[in-house]
Each structure stands twice: as structure tokens, then as C-alpha cells.
Image (cartoon, rainbow, N blue to C red):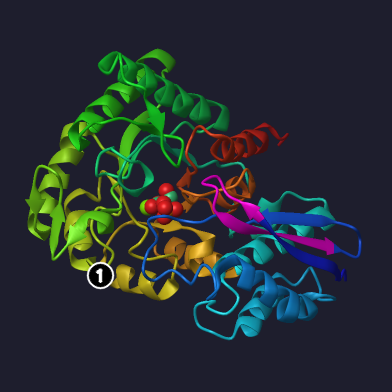
Amino acid sequence: MTEVREVSLRPIYDSRGALTVEAAVTTAGAALGCAGAPSGASTGTHEVRAWPEGGVPAALQTFRESVRPRLLGREVEDATGWDEALHAIDGTPNFAHLGGNVATALSVAAALARAKERGVEPWSLWARPGVDGRRFPAIVGNCMNGGRHAIGGPEFQEFHAISLAERPEDSVRAAVAVHHAIGKALQGKFPTLALGRGDEGGWVAPITNLEGLEILSAACAQVRDSLHLPVQPGLDLAASEFFRDGRYRYRDRSLDAAGQVAYLTELVDRFGLVYLEDPFAEEEFASFAEFTQAVGSKTVVVGDDLYTTDPIRLARGLTERASNAILIKVNQIGTISDALATVDAARAAGWKTVTSHRSGDLPDGWLAQLAVATGAYGLKCGILGGERVAKLNELLRLGALPT
Ligand code: 2PG
Ligand code: MG
């Protein structure tokens, strides 16, 4: 029995300079767990409310007045009880009173304090049945940014290196090498242009979707040849962002649902895409299902805005066979316990899970722990930039632990 002696919340800034919060939980045994809440730009409609009315200042006030007093003295070992208390204190179905980001920071901070108290790695507290901590996820590494994460880039939001080597030291090396190779390719293509990087640390350049795919697949091929490591191209389209009045609106074309299915099926074959996230808008379960039927045997089809880590939306996806994988973002649903319940439902159906950062994130490593704990297919955390590399470095640390 170890009780929570102190719990605090303070304002901090995320990688985009947006105000967010960091929670700190201290146990009676002086174990301290700290976690900040990340935040999205291309958020799904069905995510829990990130902040209450009044934003971060209101969230801090609510915490001081009505949350902290009800958390002090709780048993830190009772993970489920802690997360249930957050729901009970909030009293709404979507964390509208506390803010889902406050709940996320408090849920993760308590888990990290629990791990410290026990002297174990956090993954072992979150481990799903059959997970032993020695299987590591692929890196789903953002190399080029577009959409809402980059001004002047392509419509597709994220161009990924899917780095599939078994050992983190290999998968991270290959992902970083693809990022570097893309930088060189872009410098060659635009010798006089000042190139930039987007919200998730991927390159931004004035290129089309197809040019982006050509550069990405060439960089992956180059790294496969030089390092002899498995790395393949993938995409997060975040298609809700360019879906209006029933059509996917690109600069050079406008496609209905059937057109989008045909277009993406062709891209999968042409570029050997092994990963496609949110290829359709967030309510388009039928299009997802049609596409998964067509390419699901060779490609990981992932729902992000489609599911928002919500077990009810996942259940619909399972019934309709809308995809074969789900993205897991803790702050889409609010607590670690809720996220793990969704992971369990996906795993029970044989679906893959991908543990994901947000476009506004923090230099914390716990996401890598969660990916390992849940036997995730992928850790989606970007590649370069302090808040991205922090997660890769945590994975490297876990990979280097003695067996
Ligand atoms: C996504 C995420 C992270 P955001 O769409 O998958 O890459 O972006 O955090 O802006 O929702
Ligand atoms: Mg996404």
C-alpha cells in the first residue's frame, strides 16, 4: 500500500508553442512520476474534449479546486481506480469538465510514479497478455509533412518510413537514414530554396503528393540497398482534412469515394506502400471497408480519426471490417485504462495497433514504453526533433536492456 502524497498540475508549452499541462504525482515513498499532455492539429471529431470551456487556465483552476483534493491520499497501486476516479470527478462522457488532456497527464503521471515506486519499467505495468518486452515495434517515422502540419506542402499529411527491422538499433538507424536521404534529395531538387521542417520534424517542400511519394520510395530503396535493412514507404493522408461535400479535393483532381479507392489502390501498387492511415474521411466506414478488402492482405490500413481510440467506434469498424489496424492515442480517449481497453479489443480481433504521438508533443519517452507493452505493430513518433527523437531514444534504451 502506497498512497499519493502530492499531485500537481502546471502549465507548460508543447513543441508547437501551445500551452498545455504537466502533471506530477508523488507517492508516500517519494517516487515521482511526471507527464505532459500532447495535442493534435488534425483532430478527430469524436475525440474527448481536450480542454474545458476556458482552456488551460480554466483546467488549472478546476484541478486546484475540485480534482487535487479528491486524488490526494489515493492508493497509487490501484491503476484502474485512479483512472475511474478521473472519470467520476469529471462526470461527463467526454472529459468536458476536466479536459481530456488533463486526464491524460494525470493518468500517465500516476502510472510512471507507480513504476518508479516498484522499481520497474513502465511497460511491465501496462503489458498485455503474452507480451514479454522483447518484441519491438516498427518505427512509423514521419519524413515529409503536408496537410495541416506544413504550410505550402502536399495535401497528404504525412509521408512515412516504415522501418521494420526487429532490433530498435536497426529500425531507428534505417528511419533516420531515410530522413537524411530525403533531405539530400530535396536539396538536389531545389538547390536555391530554403527548405523547412513541419510540425512533426519531417521535411516541407513545395511538392505534389506524387513527387513526395517518388522521393520517399526512392529514399527507402536507397537505404534498403545501403544498410540492408527493411524499410518501406507509408502514408497518413488525414483525408478528413481535404474531404468536402462528399469529395476528396486535391489541387489537381477531385475524387468521389469510388475514385479515391481506385486512386489509392493504384498508389499502393505503384509505390509498394505498406501502411495507409486515414485514407478516407472520418465517417466513411464503407469506403474504408472496400479499400481494406482490396489491399488489406498486403498493406496495413489504419483508422485514426475514424476510431479516435474509442472502443465503440472500434466495435463498428470490427463489424464492418473497415480496416485491419487502429491508431492508439491516449489523449483521444483520456486515460491509459481506456486506451488499453481499446488495445485489448483490437488485439482480440487480430488487428494491429499503432501507438502514436500527436503533432504537438513533448520530449517524453513513455510512448515507446506503451508501444512495447501493447505488442504494437508500430510506434508512430516522428524521427527528428527533440520531442520525436526522445521516443526513439527510449526505444533504443529498452532494446539495450539485458535480457
Ligand atoms: C495524426 C496525428 C499525429 P495530430 O493525424 O495521426 O501524426 O496528427 O496530432 O495533428 O492529430
Ligand atoms: Mg493520423
Nearer to the camera, 8 or 221:
8
For the stretch drawn in magenta, the main secondary structure is strand
Nearer to the camera, 98 or 162:
98
User: Which image quadrant is residue 396 in?
Assistant: top right
User: Which image quadrant is residue 128 in?
Assistant: bottom right
Q: Position of residue 50 (x, y in %)?
A: 51, 67
- Please give the name of the residue rendered at 27% of the width and 56% of the height, measured from the top-left corner: 241
Q: Is residue 353 toward the left or the right of residue 82 in the image?
A: left
Q: Answer whether residue 353 is visible to the viewer in this image.
A: no
Stretch in magenta: 12-26
Nearer to the camera, 375 or 9:
9
Would you name the residue on which mark 1 appears?
320
Measured along the vertical axis of the image, is residue 345 above or below residue 183? below
Measured along the vertical axis of the image, is residue 161 above or below residue 376? above
Disc 1 residue: CB within 8 Å of ligand 2: no
Q: Is residue 400 toward the left or the right of residue 256 in the image?
A: right
Measured along the vertical axis of the image, is residue 212 above or below residue 41? above
**Quarter containing the C terminus:** top right
Q: Position of residue 3 (x, y in %)?
A: 86, 71
- Please give the name of the residue rendered at 59% of the width and 45% of the height, measured from the top-left corner: 368
Q: Amino acid at mark 1?
A: Glu
**Quarter containing the N terminus:** bottom right
Helix, strand or loop at label 1? It is helix
User: Which image quadrant is residue 267 in?
Assistant: top left
Q: Residues within 10 Å of mark 1 (few under 14, many from 20)?
A: some
Most distant residue in the right direction: 29
- Please give the name of the residue rendered at 43% of the width and 21% of the height, measured from the top-left corner: 180
Q: Position of residue 268 (x, y in %)?
A: 20, 40
Q: Position of residue 166 (x, y in %)?
A: 50, 33
- Reply yes or no: does residue 269 show up in magenta: no
- Please give the name of the residue rendered at 55% of the width and 45% of the height, measured from the top-left corner: 15
